[in-house]
Amino acid sequence: MNSPTIKITLVEDNPNFRLELVHQLEHLNYQIKGVGNAKQLDKLREMWPSDIYILDINLPGENGFSIAKRIFNPKKLGIIMLTARTDISDKIQGLEESADFYLTKPIDWRELNACIRSIHRRLSPIKPQNWVLDTQTNILISIKSDLLHLTKSDTKLLLALLETPGKIVTREQIGEALDFKSQKQSDYRLNTIICRLREKLADFDSELSIQTFRGTGYAFIGPKIEIKSQDAITLSL
């Protein structure tokens, strides 16, 4: 069943076809209103702005191309051209200027429904529920979709800490995760990498921190972070 929150306005001057299309889309559980021309559309938009506009091209007064160009706002709405005009030049004009889809009459209801759902997905993208650490690109992605670019060493260090978030990870364990060959190399480089990553995290978001336990190790303090690799995504506990 489709979401009843999707609001659609149909601009179609043929009253019989307009009534039929409104009925069909209401049956698919969409909220839809139909008008016959641009003036009626403008009055309706003041009271009832829609997510998706289905426009005929051959309309009395202002045509569908002009309407689409005028109301075009890809961040807030979608446009479907629905017309009897099958010329490829018309289709190219509609798609290049503003339309998400260009459909010709007679229509297949399944195709129209698929187009509506596609636009709705674009306008209402699924937001991540957790932070994400992408180990392929070495990028930390916040729940607001902000990006923090890390080095490979930063990512390895953060991965080691995220194996047991909130709990102590020893310097020896971190050194192994970073593939350090000697204790001397480990002490010097580990201090540098931890200091650098701590500053990056603090500048990026105040909730992120690496806590030091003197003589023992370090612990990651912050929100839940998903580990995204090429093969799978796992949740840090």
Image (spheres, rainbow, N blue to C red):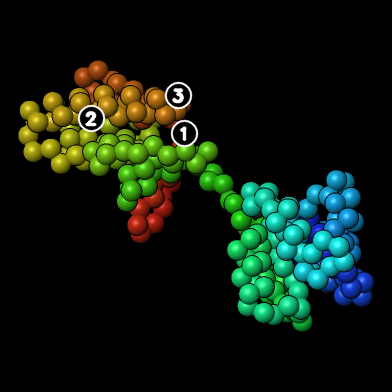
Local SS, label 3? loop
Image disc number at residue 223: 1
Crowding at label 3, few (<14), some or many (≥20) Cα neighbours within 10 Å? few
Q: Residue at x 30, y 29 (%)?
A: 197
Residue 53 x %, y %: 76, 60
Residue 119 seen in this snapshot: no
Quadrant of res 149: top left
Q: Residue furthest right?
A: 15
Residue neighbourhood size for the residue with mark 1, other residues' Cα within 10 Å, grouped as few (<14), some (14–19), many (≥20): some
Residue at image location 90% in from the left, 56% down from the top: 40
Q: The N terminus appears in which quarter of the rendering?
A: bottom right
Task: Using the image, tell me which numbered label, if any, was put on residue 193.
Answer: 2
Viewer-proximal residue among 72 and 224: 72
Left or right for 52, reference 122: right
- CA distance separating discs 2 and 3: 19 Å
Residue 184, placed above or below residue 27: above
Q: Nearer the viewer, mark 1 or mark 3?
A: 3
151 sits to left or right of 58 = left
